Image (cartoon, helix red, strand yellow):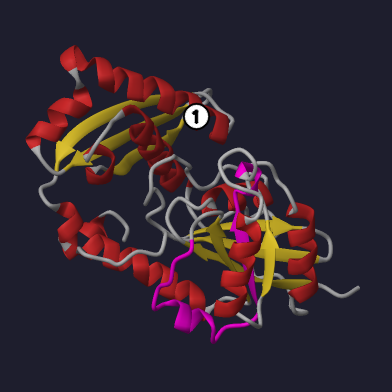
Amino acid sequence: MIYKSGFVNIIGFPNTGKSTLMNSLVGERLSIITYKPQTTRHRILGIINESNFQIIFSDTPGIIHPVYPMQKIMMQYVEKSLEDADIILLITEIGKLEYFPIFNEIKKKAPIIILINKIDKIGIKFKENILYHAIDYWHKLFPNSEILPISALKKTNQDLLMNKIITLLSEHPPYYPKEFLSNRSKRFFVNEIIREKIFFLYKKEIPYSVEINTVLFKKEKTFIDILSCVYVERNSQKGILIGKRGETLKKLKFFSVKSIESFLKKKIKLKLNVKVCPNWRHDYKKLKFFGY
């Protein structure tokens, strides 16, 4: 029996559904999802293992024009994903027609599948003919690539996409052991889940100024004991994150516990400490400490 495997790297603009697509394809909630742009900061692998193939999906930060060090590192993750890609899924969405210089590098890679996401909004938010304009636009930019309209949320054309990917994969033994679901640790996913809840509970600059570091992850008989530090850049942000009499932090803890228990499939005891780490997004040494 022929066995296939390869890296299928998802690249695209912020908030176009990259994380939703990977979670849907893998069948696990590995990447955090919010309605706000630039939610994904790291490169996250999600692995599918079947009897005759292994697909290593890679979720990446959205393509942006980087300004400060953290954004520059995020874009390095995108550039790195071009180097090891066996297949590139370039994801955009209905109504978004943009061009970035990195497209010149993407064009050198093959094969490429252009995914026009959120087609479930056609007829509700957009006119019917907008899809034809989008297909024409992306065909002119990437004339040698396949174009597939999808809805990651509704799983529209997902089976068709998987069949295309499997067909394009090369014969190769598995890159990872069969039991692997991702290359990331459980601590990493705890950090990401807490950060996701911050995106939903707090407004303005707070979610973008926060980083999480889980310093204790201890397995007990009936639960997992977790201590996570929530870092902000300024004292004023610390006060907002904690809230009056600690009420907002209690909400963050409540929703985080629910999601972490669902992910780990085990009861947890979570403690959150809020600390100030000035200008961490602009400091390469601090970014390295946080795993960038």
Rendering coords of residue 23 (x, y %): 60, 47
Q: Give me the residue at 53% from left, 60% from top.
A: 92
Secondary structure found at label 1: helix
Rendering coords of residue 31 (x, y %): 50, 47
Q: Residues within 10 Å of mark 1 (few under 14, many from 20)?
A: some
Q: Which residue is mark 1?
A: 259
Quick check: 191 left or right of 238? right
Q: Is residue 104 magenta?
A: yes
Q: Where the N terminus falls, by quadrant?
A: bottom right
Rendering coords of residue 144 (x, y %): 66, 83
* Residue type pointed to by label 1: Ser
Q: Give me the residue at 66% from left, 77% from top.
A: 145
The answer to whether residue 88 is visible is no
Quick check: 280 left or right of 216? left
Highlighted magenta segment, given as a residue range: 97-121
Front one among 222 and 79? 79
| Residue, far right | 1
Q: Is residue 273 magenta?
A: no
Quick check: 261 left or right of 124? left
